[in-house]
Image (cartoon, rainbow, N blue to C red):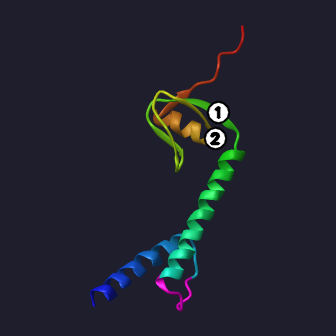
């Protein structure tokens, strides 16, 4: 009985995740199949984020606090990094970073 409750609870959580990723659930899927579909969607979302990040026009910023331009890319405070201009704008407005552009030659 306890295993049935855990399976039901896991399926409820996975249904919420599936809805987030806009996955149409087939009622015959096992919990393992649904979990794989969710994992596939998560990988696809991350791949798109990585591709968009790589293609975006970048601005160099100096981090005032630790930041994560990508889910798996931590930039510690005090370091510089190149981030998409829209992200740089948000971070600067929030006080997380400041511009780190070189001064123009005189």
Q: Nearer the viewer, residue 91 or 8?
A: 8
Is-magenta flag for residue 30? yes
Neighbours of disc 1 within 10 Å: few (<14), some (14-19), many (20+): some
Q: Is residue 64 left or right of residue 99?
A: left
Kindly identify the residue that appears in the image at 43 percent across and 34 percent down: 65
Q: Which residue is mark 2?
A: 84
The region drawn magenta spans 25-31
Position of residue 106 relative to residue 82, above or below, is above
On the image, the x and y values in percent for residue 77 come to 45, 31
Q: Secondary structure at mark 1?
A: strand
Q: Is residue 41 left or right of residue 31?
A: right
Q: Are marks 1 and 2 in contact (CB under 8 Å)?
A: yes
> Which image quadrant is residue 24 in?
bottom right
Q: Secondary structure at mark 2?
A: strand
Is-magenta flag for residue 94? no
Q: Nearer the viewer, residue 90 or 6?
A: 6
On the image, the x and y values in percent for residue 7 come to 37, 83
Quadrant (top left, top right, bottom left, bottom right) of the C terminus: top right
> Which image quadrant is residue 1 in?
bottom left
Of helix, strand and loop, which mostly describes the magenta segment? loop
On the image, the x and y values in percent for residue 51 come to 68, 52
Q: Which residue is mark 1?
A: 59
Neighbours of disc 2 within 10 Å: few (<14), some (14-19), many (20+): some
Kindly identify the residue that appears in the image at 50 percent across and 76 percent down: 35
Q: Earlier in the sequence, mark 1 or mark 2?
A: 1
């Amino acid at each position: 009985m306890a295993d049935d409750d855990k399976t039901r609870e896991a399926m409820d959580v996975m249904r919420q995740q599936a809805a987030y990723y806009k996955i149409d659930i087939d009622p015959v899927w096992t919990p393992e199949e649904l979990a794989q579909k969710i994992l596939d969607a998560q990988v696809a979302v991350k791949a798109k984020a990585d591709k968009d990040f790589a293609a975006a026009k970048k601005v160099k910023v100096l981090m005032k606090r630790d930041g994560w331009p990508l889910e798996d890319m931590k930039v510690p405070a005090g370091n510089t990094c190149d981030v998409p201009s829209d992200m740089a704008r948000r971070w600067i407005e929030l006080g997380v970073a400041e511009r780190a552009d070189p001064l123009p030659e005189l």
